[in-house]
Image (cartoon, rainbow, N blue to C red):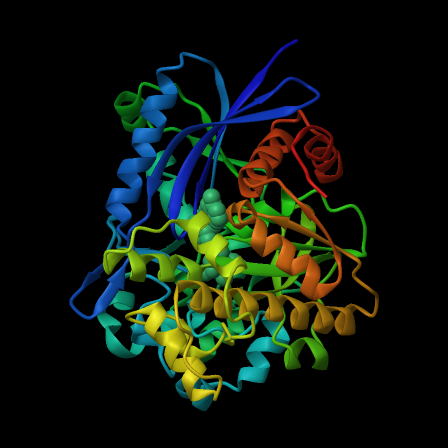
Amino acid sequence: KDIVYNLAFDFGASSGRLMLSKFDGEKIDVEEVYRFPNEPVKLGQSLYWDFLRLFHELKNGLKIASKRKIKISGIGIDTWGVDYGLLDKNDELISNPIHYRDQRTNGIMKKVEKVLPLEEIYNITGIQFMEFNTIFQLYCDLMRRPELLDNAKTLLFIPDLLNFYLTNDKYNEYTVASTSQMLDAEKRDWAIDLIKKLNIPESIFQKILMPGKIIGYLSKEIQEETGLSDIPVISVGSHDTASAVAGTPIENGSSAYLICGTWSLLGVESESPIINENTKKYNFTNEGGVEGFIRLLKNINGLWIIQQLKQSWNSNGIKIGFPGISQMASKAEHEEFIINPDDKLFIAPDDMAEAIKQYCVETGQGLPQDIGDIARAAYNGIVEQYKNCLNNLEDIIGRKIDTIHMVGGGIQDKFLCELTADVTGRKVITGPVEASIYGNVIVQLMALGYIKDLKEGRKIIKNYSELRK
Ligand code: ADP
Ligand code: LRH
């Protein structure tokens, strides 16, 4: 049988990975080629992504892959959403892309509201309000550093930017562009009126490219540097969540997906945007998905809290990893401590363990005593949000959700999965861990004509990847 090989990059907020996929017509095997940390850098008052390092790691991955001497049919890249780089008239990056957790957007929605009612933004875009959405970041740029936008000719989201430096072709891929809160959800194109009302220069926005198209081919320079040939770079669901949803073997309307990475993303697939009083009230989002689907979901501040707890304990000399934290939480002496993970306190605290202690004391619960208690408060809070979110989702769609498909790095945490099943009372099916990679590969194979549609792709994943009930 002919084997089709593809390369899929998934850049998460905590790490990036390159996987080589092998498709033999029946099953898709993925093998990790390279993994690297994604470490943001605080410089002065700003928090930046280390974009140059990330591009360097991308090329490192390609160099390792090229040593395999196999014919690669395509490359696809997905990353986190909302963040962007601005290019000047010579296509030079004007500033290093800023991290969505940077504090410049604190309180920005109040300022935007004076110019444009938030309701109008939601009615057109259907996107949940989060201060870090591109629309708000750009408005900050306009107020703080207008020279950036004066000189900007092109806005590219992070995956667009990586694709551009591989191919020299400039597009805004649809799924990631939808996270900007500047797309018209129905038309699936730029909401020019909103953009104009905020005085953001409309000329910086590129043509929207749907997932499943060839963006371009590796440039001569990249070919020389990596040893690869003129391989096509394919637009996948370049928002990591879009790829993860595509890579989740959802079967029917009574199943929800729950992607557990730095964020927890919980929702369903919808044929068209759902924008009404309920979605507004519960702040649900209508992000763009692959094959024309809308991702009706909500962001829950998820394993970021566990990541930050680990960092806080490690930097205080306590050697503990994710499995250790999970185990101690499961055996916590006090099982009842609980936080609200979406409280502002937990967005970017200096010390997460201290923030949790402070929250518990201030809410009259007393002081969590040790690692187990503190971690348990976080787990309880995260899972309680899953439950609330499911109830709200049922209210919105008017049908019951009986099954949750949990995917992403976080499902390696058995306690998290068990607690989710216990607290929500729903059936939990886990896998795959690397859902974004699978979704990325499926869309590449669709673009190349090897797989008919998403349904067929998901069937392949369901039959051959390791799923657990
Ligand atoms: P992202 O794509 O946002 O960078 P991942 O999908 O890689 O995130 O998930 C990372 C998270 O998965 C970690 O923050 C951690 O909470 C969890 N995790 C990873 N490995 C393990 C493990 N062995 N045991 C428990 N939890 C784990
Ligand atoms: C998850 C994610 C999420 C966005 C956030 C910025 O990685 O892409 O969907 O809201 O990062």
Can residue 165 be seen in the rendering of this structure? yes
Q: Nearer the viewer, residue 197 or 40?
A: 40
Residue in front for this viewpoint, 443 or 61: 61
- The residue positioned 69% from the left and 53% from the top of the image is 293
Q: Is residue 429 left or right of residue 40?
A: right
Q: Quadrant of the N terminus?
A: top right
Q: Position of residue 26 (x, y in %)?
A: 71, 21
Identified at 51% across, 71% down, the residue is 334
Q: Residue, x 56% and y 72% (percent of image)?
A: 128
Q: Residue furthest left?
A: 44
All told, the count of numbered labels is 0
Q: Residue visible at 61% across and 29% down?
A: 445
Q: Residue furthest top?
A: 1
- Quadrant for residue 44, please give it: bottom left
Name the quadrant containing residue 247. Answer: top right
Residue 292 position in % (x across, y down): 68, 50
Q: Nearer the viewer, residue 442 or 377?
A: 377
Residue 36 percent across, percent down from the top left: 33, 39
Counting from the top left corner in percent of width and height, residue 61 is at 35, 30
Direction from residue 377 to residue 227 in the image, left or right: left
Q: Quadrant of the C terminus?
A: top right
